[in-house]
Image: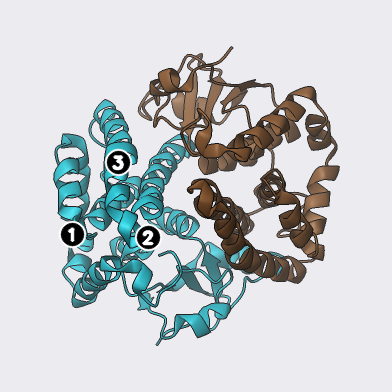
Chain colours: A cyan, B brown
Amino acid sequence: MSFSDATTFVPASTAGVADSFESPVSFKLLYFPIHSNGATSREILSYGQAQWTNLIPKDWDREKTRTPFHVLPVLYIATSLGKELILSEAGVIEQYLSKQWGLLGDNEYEEHLIKVFHSSSASLQNSHASSAVWVAPETRAAGVAAFREGALRTWMESHEKHLMANGNMVTTWAISLADIKTANVIDHLGLQPGGQQLIHLIMRSPALRKVHATVAQSPRIAAWRASQEYLLLSKGTRAFFADPTGMTIKSRV
Amino acid sequence: MSFSDATTFVPASTAGVADSFESPVSFKLLYFPIHSNGATSREILSYGQAQWTNLIPKDWDREKTRTPFHVLPVLYIATSLGKELILSEAGVIEQYLSKQWGLLGDNEYEEHLIKVFHSSSASLQNSHASSAVWVAPETRAAGVAAFREGALRTWMESHEKHLMANGNMVTTWAISLADIKTANVIDHLGLQPGGQQLIHLIMRSPALRKVHATVAQSPRIAAWRASQEYLLLSKGTRAFFADPTGMTIKSRV
């Protein structure tokens, strides 16, 4: 199974759609056979014990016109209305799913702090992509070094400072969207060529080490990470980023 | 005046902070003296007739440690609690401000559709930045061409399709965060070297032309755009992007 039925957004004016959106029944997440921008949504779905299916495109170049913006991930939401809803854009999907299972804090202020940290960690991954992934192979080593000494160091120092000021976590919750995203971005960097050096650097930060460990210890996330499906995605991620510009997945993943 | 007092996040556990966050009194937005990632927040503040101040850093390289992640924009929020709150990350600030003045639709579903379009247009600007701005000057022309034929064309075609399906706007509202962002990104592209060619291409789309015109016709946004302060920001934007890698603002703006 690859694509689901919905190919475009159901208009907001459709009768019943607003109510049905708030009571989703089950989900399908469509993304490439790697972690990257699919990782956080898959872990939230696992954390929430949602009824969900992990979809992988079979022939993306031919199939991409079936998605709203020709980019992945895409989330399909089955509702009681009997009409499948579709959402696009990784950050929006992650925020929506987080809200379903209490991963956005206890009030508007906590929610916004969590979104700030979520966005900052997502930006770090984008910064890595533009300086060290989507570059000519001969400039990659210089790009990795610039990333390590620039964006990565600033991110580490500032997150460490804020996490320490808040008792090692961004919220009073045991786990939040921000924590899952931060842990996923750390693991993403570790799966890059030479990524173990980046992990070694990040793990010098006690607060980031604690966020990473806390997410890994969540029983439902741990169960997903131990699955055969997850291990195949890890293998796919390593293979993809070993030679990203040579692979057939042309989009930025 | 450049920086405000707050330099870090007020912990969510602070007494009264969650309530005060929902009743802001006034705002200061700190960003570089250009439009780019400050444009949408400034227009929302203008649209909302907020009491707000536009702050510009005086010496960013020395001052950036006074911001949470060493990136701009940053929003300072004065509340009845007497404690200034701070938010970071352009997308989160834009979403927060939009919520204050009804620019996020009427229900959760509309809000998520608006956020999807908001994110897609923000991604287009990021895609332009990485293919045509933060590149070696000798590869810029090729980068602009790749952007025009790739990301821009896909964005135009997909947004046109969705806008037409929804009666030329993403929501049933007269104006939303998505519309303001889309209009701002179009104007951003127009201020780039050779940007008039991109504008010419985009304006061939009736739906995108209508979004752009609708935002421009909003009386409070029109008043802000006619101000001396706005015109100086336009001038600064043109000057900055004429030679971005040679300017003293080193961060991605």
Left or right: residue A83 versus residue B219 is: left
Name the residue beneath numbered marker 3.
A152
- The chain containing the residue under callout 3 comes to A
Discs 2, 3: same chain: yes
Label ID, residue A219: 1
Q: Residue at x 82, y 50 (%)?
A: B214
Picture coordinates of residue B51, whole percent (x, y): 69, 21
Picture coordinates of residue A97, whole percent (x, y): 43, 59
- The chain containing the residue under callout 1 comes to A
Q: Earlier in the sequence, mark 2 or mark 3?
A: 2
Q: Is disc 3 placed on a helix, strand or loop?
A: helix
Q: Earlier in the sequence, mark 2 or mark 1?
A: 2
Asked if the residue at tag 1 contacts the one at tag 2, i.e. Cβ–Cβ closer than 8 Å, the answer is no
Left or right: residue A72 versus residue A165 is: right
Tell me the distance, in whole angstroms, between the alpha carbons under discs 2 and 3. 21 Å
Q: Is disc 2 placed on a helix, strand or loop?
A: loop
B9 is higher (above) or lower (below) than A90:
above
Tell me the distance, in whole angstroms, between the alpha carbons under discs 2 and 1. 41 Å
Nearer the observer, disc 3 or disc 1?
A: 3
Considering every residue shown, the one lying at the far front of the view is B138
Q: Residue at x 71, y 71 (%)?
A: B161
Picture coordinates of residue A235, whole percent (x, y): 21, 72
- Give, as a three-letter code, the residue at label 1: Pro
A194 is higher (above) or lower (below) than A158:
below
Q: Is disc 1 placed on a helix, strand or loop?
A: helix
- Out of B115 and A126, give the one closest to the viewer: A126
Name the residue beneath numbered marker 2.
A136
Nearer the observer, disc 2 or disc 3?
A: 2
Q: Residue at x 23, y 61 (%)?
A: A221
Discs 2, 1: same chain: yes
- Give, as a three-letter code, the residue at label 3: Leu
The crowding category of the residue bearing disc 1, from other C-alpha atoms within 10 Å (few below 14, some 14 to 19, many at least 20), is few
